[in-house]
Image (cartoon, rainbow, N blue to C red):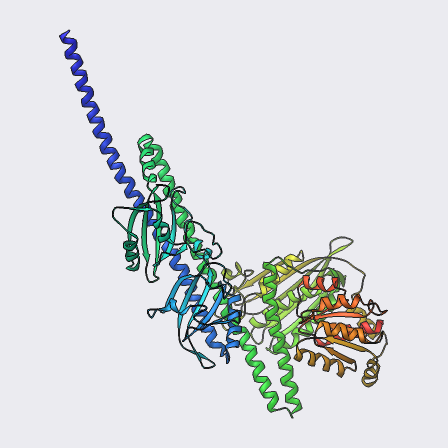
Amino acid sequence: MNEKKKHGKKKLFISIAVALVIGSIVFFYVKELNDAVKKNMQVSVAELAEHDIKSIRAYIGMMWDSLGNIQERMNSYHCDTVEQTQERMNLECATSDFEFLCLVAEDGTVYTDKYMTYSRNELDVLSFFSGGKDKTIGIFNDKMRVADIKREMVLYGVRLNDYEIDGIKFVAMAGMCSKESVSNFLSVSVFEGSGYSGVIDHNGNYLVSEVRTTALNRQDNLFTRLRHGKFIGGNSIEAVREKLVKNETFSFQYLDTDGVRKDIYCKSIDGMDLTFLMIIPANVLVKQIMNFVVMSMVILFVFVIILIAVFIFLYYSSQRVNRISAETKVRNEFLTNMSHEIRTPLNGLIGLNHLSRVHIDNKDKLEKYLDKMQSTATYLLSLVNDVLDVAKFQSGKVEVIREPMCIDTIMDEIWSMQYNNVHSRGVEFLMNRDISFPFVMGDEVRVKQVLMNIIGNAAKFTPEGGKITVSVTQQEEDANCVMTTFTCTDTGCGMSPKYLEHIWEAFSQDKNSDSAGVKGTGLGMTISNLLVRAMGGEIYVESELGKGSTFTVILHSEITKTIPDIVESHTQYEEGTEPEAEDSGREKKKSFHILVAEDVELNAEILVEILQQEGFTVDHAANGREAVEMFRQSPPGEYDIILMDMQMPIMDGCTASMEIRKLDRPDAKTVVIFACTANTFQEDRDKAMKSGMDGFLSKPIRVSAMLNKLERTLRGK
């Protein structure tokens, strides 16, 4: 009995001892685990905070740089009036990442890119620059609703020096964009969605909160939230506010309205009066400790996976920032090239205009200057067309048509348009043809555009004494289709193998020493490649540095026996219908009456004078409503053709065309109406046709093409 008692006491002692050892081990294990988890969480918070802060700084710095670039370009525009300055700001805003641009005068008056002006009492932007800041960022809310800004926005500002327009001294430029643009650079949530990150200013206003969308005129404030909770550890709103103003890094705990304890980590963003914060519920720590106790190895594995995910996230976020920086650099380089390309011919046009005025009595010199002005203006038009073409491809609005075209005619026109360009550079220009099926289906304009791009590039990069050879051959694919191959071979500077890998990319340009002096937008080959692919063809290039290049374009086309209109008109002339004497032709044209609907006075004056010089009787309407009334009040059959601009005040051209077609008179349905407009996209053409128009003339007007179209129409009448 005593032995049993002794044995029982021994077992109890051992059990207690084991329990104490196990308890001690568990205690120290949990303690060390708790410390490890806390340290791990602190490291994770610090890493996430540092990454997000770098992302924010990079993005804000990029926006400040963008404002600085806009400021530099504004300085170069030499605007004389505030209205001109606002117009330039409107254009800059349209091509930037800002939704709203403004200049701030010395007295606080705000001049916006929307052509509006506000006093400081109405729109206070100047206060953001208090304390002599050169750069500023803050949260803007149009509480008075004078500028119709319906949501909180981020305001970026830079101080201006010596910037004065029309007697007004401007001290700052500001740009605004949505808060969402900043939130894209932050982690949406952390610690499995239990916590979140944000950015606040010294007043506690959220630049980015856990709610990533922006409500209309809703202001989100940290201090407002804290007032509804309770601080832990003796902190207060005033203490937090003081630390924010001092740009300190600190943390504190508080209970929210649901009784959940939360840890708030705050880190200032240097030089920006902003603070990054991360809010994490306290139960996150408890959950992680319990999981480690229950399944240490499993959690360790999960932790490793989380770390890997974090590093992957950091890597891709870094890649995203680098990509944005690279895209910004490419865009800035493109704008620089565009500025050079546009300013150079504009300088030529201004100079030639001056010389034309000086030598207005010297017919030979005047004709030479006018020819050069025409050539320069044509180049400017092609430059604008290149940019528009790229925009259309990027938006998926590719315009490729299929209609009868003549390969021989295309090659004749290419030769005619490029001969002077090539020979003026001292380069030999040869053209070889082996055409079995001259009439095929295709897009003549686009084919010429591709060939002009390729031959134009060959001319630019082929030195004096070189040679450019253009060849076209055909091979029958079946009874209905033919493969047409265009090749352009030059003896120019050639291209490096590295550049050939990127030749079809937008804005790409070779940087070898032989081509360094040749400037361009870097869009020609991109457009050519996109056009050829859109037409179902192929385009290839072979080149060797210092020995020249060969471009090959292959098109697969349906054979047609239909003769294109331009070939028919040439054929009729060649068959013996001699042109009438110029004076006789003009006398006959006087019997034809044309109504020109154009709201721009200069355009109308030019168009009316051209038509009158050709012998037509011309009337002018300043808008669509006036055109309808002039037609309504005219005798039936008075007008043979109406040239209708599409965009006009009071009534646009399409509405005016529909109104004319609805009139109760015999010629309302038969009078010929041509759209004469700068709206050249396919949807614009479709809209014109649906409104009842009969044809389309695009601006800038090609006079010869317009007169040819008018004469063919009137010949039919």
Dividing the image into 4 quarters, which one contains the N terminus? top left
505 relative to 307, above or below: below
Residue 679: % across, % down: 66, 67
573 relative to 434, above or below: below
Q: Nearer the viewer, residue 553 or 375?
A: 375
Q: What residue occupies the far top of the structure in this picture?
A: 1
Residue 150: % across, % down: 50, 60
Image point (24%, 37%), residue name: 32
Q: What residue occupies the far bottom of the structure in this picture?
A: 361
Residue 593 makes an appearance in the image: yes
Q: Quadrant of residue 456?
A: bottom right
Image point (66%, 86%), residue name: 367
Q: Nearer the viewer, residue 257 or 264?
A: 257
Q: Quadrant of residue 684?
A: bottom right
Residue 511 makes an appearance in the image: no
221 relative to 570, above or below: above
Q: How many marks?
A: 0
356 relative to 391, above or below: below
Q: Quadrant of residue 663?
A: bottom right
Residue 698: % across, % down: 69, 70
